Image (cartoon, grey):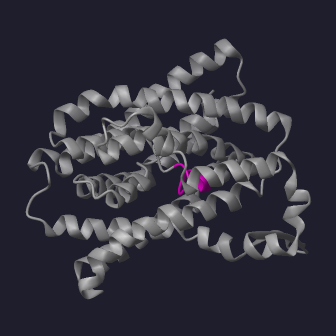
């Protein structure tokens, strides 16, 4: 529990530093161009490195594969269900089209990588880390297809254009990494000096097992911090404006209500649904616990990053929602973790 709280404190501090840099114009005229370039750097460079390094380090078994793909299926279903659950609220409180579209994406996608992986690792150990990847796979497949359509506003995109969105560095990294892991290449290629130099190396000492990250692995580890730094910069731009892009109704109260619905109401709803389904199908309890906890994560920082990448008019409001959600998660996630220890 202290590890989880410390993780949130670190992320919030990075966000504050980004806010201070943007608010005080510390980088002078380069601030605006830096924030947009930083979003592209995260999406196209550091995140693919993080994905490949993380997944290729896992040694899958038949049991973890079975439970993992079950988690993948339920993740897709509950991510899509969240869009239907949140639509009435979004229509009522977010009148601006671009702001509404960004929050539809927020409704679906959680911070399942930057926060989900460390939280599930703290809750379930190495097994939790493995299962977090399956949820993230479902999350990212929908993010880089339906999510891109929502955030970019390309409502008229045809099937061919939508499928092209899957050909991006993040999904390619997923495919390569999972193939690498399933073929057991960590026993051959993963032991080479080149792989260890680029990605990671696990070694034993008298103090236990340690992992040392290589060049690209270390670069990937910057993803979470860079994302929160970027969010802070966007927040500084938001505070500097006289009003939000969709008027007072889409300000902090609307964003706060959205966060409460996402991080309290929907996770509780999913708890009962998953429990009933799990009893009927005889699922392993770890399956429903992983999905429940991932659904309780704060909104995905990648949504704000991609919104800036596509120059969406809803990026400022999304930054407000993201920071409120991240701050609230410091309270709600420890509660959910305690609840999972006693809940069926």
- Quadrant showing the N terminus: bottom right
Nearer to us in this view, 8 or 184: 184
Rendering coords of residue 118 (x, y %) = 61, 56
User: Which image quarter: residue 307?
Assistant: bottom left
Q: Which residue is drawn at the image coordinates 64% and 55% (left, top)?
A: 173
Locate residue 314 relative to residue 240 in the image: left or right: right
In the rendered view, tell whether residue 234 sits above or below residue 136: below
Regarding residue 125, the answer to whether it shows in the image is no
The verdict on residue 31 being magenta is: no
Nearer to us in this view, 88 or 99: 99
Rendering coords of residue 98 (x, y %) = 23, 46
Locate residue 64 relative to residue 269 in the image: left or right: right
Furthest toward the top, the residue is 280
Q: Which residue is drawn at the image coordinates 71% and 47% (left, top)?
A: 130
Range of the magenta residues? Answer: 112-119
Nearer to us in this view, 158 or 235: 158
Rendering coords of residue 311 (x, y %) = 28, 59
- Quadrant showing the C terminus: top right
Q: Which residue is drawn at the image coordinates 54% and 53% (left, top)?
A: 168
Regarding residue 255, the answer to whether it shows in the image is yes
Q: Which residue is drawn at the image coordinates 40% and 37% (left, top)?
A: 264
Rendering coords of residue 27 (x, y %) = 30, 86
In the rendered view, tell whether residue 129 sits above or below residue 221: above
């Amino acid at each position: 529990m202290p590890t989880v709280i410390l993780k949130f404190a670190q992320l919030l501090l990075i966000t504050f530093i980004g806010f201070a840099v943007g608010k005080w114009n510390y980088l002078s005229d380069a601030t605006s161009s830096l924030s947009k370039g930083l979003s592209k750097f995260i999406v196209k460079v550091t995140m693919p490195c993080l994905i490949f390094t993380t997944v290729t380090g896992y040694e899958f078994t038949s049991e973890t594969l079975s439970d993992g793909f079950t988690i993948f299926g339920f993740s897709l279903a509950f991510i899509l269900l969240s869009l239907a659950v949140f639509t009435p609220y979004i229509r009522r409180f977010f009148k601006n089209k671009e702001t509404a579209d960004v929050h539809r994406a927020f409704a679906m996608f959680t911070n399942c990588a930057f926060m989900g992986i460390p939280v599930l690792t703290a809750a379930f150990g190495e097994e939790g880390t493995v299962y977090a990847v399956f949820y993230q796979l479902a999350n990212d497949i929908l993010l880089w297809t339906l999510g891109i359509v929502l955030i970019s506003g390309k409502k008229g995109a045809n099937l061919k254009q939508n499928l092209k969105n899957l050909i991006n560095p993040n999904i390619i990294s997923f495919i390569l990494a999972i193939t690498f892991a399933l073929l057991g290449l960590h026993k051959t290629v993963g032991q080479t000096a080149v792989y260890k130099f680029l990605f990671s190396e696990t070694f034993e000492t008298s103090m236990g097992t340690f992992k040392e990250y290589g060049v690209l692995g270390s670069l990937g580890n910057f993803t979470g911090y860079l994302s929160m730094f970027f969010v802070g910069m966007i927040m500084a731009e938001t505070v500097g404006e006289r009003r939000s892009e969709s008027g007072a109704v889409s300000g902090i109260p609307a964003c706060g209500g959205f966060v409460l619905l996402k991080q309290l109401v929907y996770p509780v709803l999913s708890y009962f649904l998953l429990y009933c389904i799990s009893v009927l199908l005889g699922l392993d309890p770890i399956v429903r616990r992983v999905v429940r906890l991932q659904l309780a994560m704060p909104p995905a920082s990648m949504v704000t990053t991609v919104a800036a990448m596509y120059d969406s008019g809803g990026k400022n409001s999304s930054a407000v929602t993201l920071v409120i959600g991240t701050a609230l998660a410091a309270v709600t996630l420890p509660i959910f973790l305690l609840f999972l220890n006693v809940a069926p």
